[in-house]
Amino acid sequence: MAYKHGIEVTEKATSVRSPLSTRYGVQVIFGTAPVNLAKDPAATVNRPIKADTFEEAQEALGYSEDWEQYTLCQGMYASFQLFQIAPVIFVNVLDPQKHTKELEEKEYAVSNHRAVVDILGVLKDTVTVTAKMESRVGAASVGVAVASGGSVELEKDKDYILDFDDYGRLAVTLLSTGAAYSAVGVTVTGNVLAPEKVTEEDLIGAYDVEHGTESGMEVLRQVYPKYGLVPSILLAPGWTEKPNVGVALQAKCQDINGAFRAVCLLDLDTKQAHKYTDCIKVKEQMGYDDPHAIVLWPKVITAGRCMSYSAVYGAMMSYNTANNSDVPYLYPSNRALNVEGAVLSDGTEVYLDQVQAGNLNGDGVVTVFCDLEWKSYGNNTGCYPANTDPKDRWIGCRRMFDYVANYFAVEYRKRLDSNMNWRTVDDIVNSFNIWGNSLTASGMCAGLYMEYRREENTVENILAGYMKLRIYFAPYTPAEYIGATMEFDVSTLENAMAEEG
């Protein structure tokens, strides 16, 4: 080891905070990704892909700052950059075999033996490169085309290699051992992604009876069998502004895998709902009225770019769930969104006061409110005001009912097919009540317990192998309104004046 005398400063890589992990706040995000940048583009289509870090998501699906065209990137940024929450399930519906167009033939200048294609979305495996050679004397040994300054078709990995730069642009690097190392220009042909060709039908998806395959939202069924994760928050940023997509997502919230429930996040179209008073009409027209739907307006700005509110709200919900013992007992209203503002699609800034935001909440719409920082604002699901049942209208109650149901389905699946005797009954009821008491003692609910009633478990049901249990649950409602009455205290003033005299 070298002898040291003096001052020395060394540097280490920036430490990134490890993301929180959730089991009962897992987001499932549907949309499109720049799969030409993915490690294996063909493997990204219509399958659930789990990511625990931004780097994992980027490697598996690609990443682009063109959030409007590549909507899954909104969820990546919100989940891993704004809130550091994992895991997240992504479902990409952009098919590189189907949603493409031909790259416009164009010559690109070569600088330092490298040419960059200024079109995003180029699929590497479809690319053909032709080099334009500079005329050189004595170059006959290289080839007639080279010597005469003509063009020559190049061979991949022999004459050039392909990669992507930091902006997602395709770069052609000429190899020194190839036939065109001194080329002055290259012409690139091939196919490029066309996200604009992705349709609502692609996102909604279907089950292919002939091949036994699923697409779009039908892929949701695969999440639990593949990863053992319960889908809790469903969203499709940039897509639920289309009513067909939003209604289809609403329909997916219940009976997932025959056992689970989730909430979905639905963005209102800010082109139709241009002001807050338009929202109730647009919400009704779009059919966003389900107890499991959380309706959102308007859009938000982060990193100087416009993003669907659902992408940020979903990450925030998931983060706060994980940050509170992985139990969604705290309401996701009045929580920091880590964004820079609220806008419409055309960039118009939105600043609501307490009265306007409250009116939106009364229409069953969750909005944003600036109170020193930008926060979520609203406690009602999409079913309000038509449905006032507290288990349905309050977001916190709805999520807690779903949570308890999902927990029961996961934790007590191992009790299935046990002998139906008192030991099994007691085991289920007692263990559930111990868990329920722990939630109650922690202040996560007012009460939770289970009963087995003899009169409901008849001989016929027992012989049929059917056990019936009852769960009684009381989650807390939100302190949505806090009022105080002020009164002039005359007697205190009289006493004070008397003392001074």
Image (cartoon, rainbow, N blue to C red):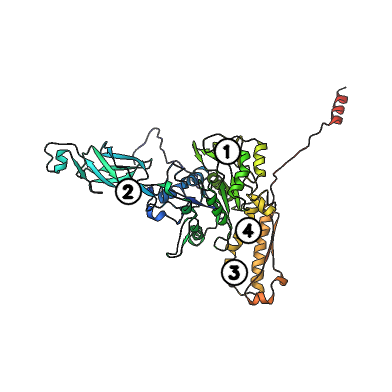
Q: Is residue 289 above or below residue 184?
A: below
The residue that disc 4 covers is: 404
Give coordinates of residue 232: x percent, y percent: 56, 54
Label 3 environment density (alpha carbons within 10 Å; few <14, some 14–19, many ≥20): few
Which kind of residue does numbered mark 4 sit on?
Val
Give coordinates of residue 457: x percent, y percent: 69, 72
Mark 1 vs mark 4, CA separation in Å: 38 Å
Mark 2 vs mark 1, CA separation in Å: 41 Å
Q: Secondary structure at mark 4?
A: helix
Q: Nearer the viewer, mark 3 or mark 4?
A: 4
At horizontal 45% and vertical 57% (from top left) the residue drawn is: 47
Direction from residue 486 to residue 58 in the image, left or right:
left
The residue that disc 2 covers is: 124
Mark 3 vs mark 4, CA separation in Å: 17 Å
In primary-sequence order, the first of circles 3 and 4 is 4
Q: Nearer the viewer, mark 2 or mark 1?
A: 1
- Say which quadrant the C terminus sits in: top right
Q: Quadrant of residue 275?
A: top right
Give coordinates of residue 334: x percent, y percent: 63, 42
In primary-sequence order, the first of circles 1 and 3 is 1
Which kind of residue does numbered mark 3 sit on?
Arg
Q: Which mark is residue 415?
A: 3
The residue that disc 1 covers is: 274
Label 4 environment density (alpha carbons within 10 Å; few <14, some 14–19, many ≥20): some
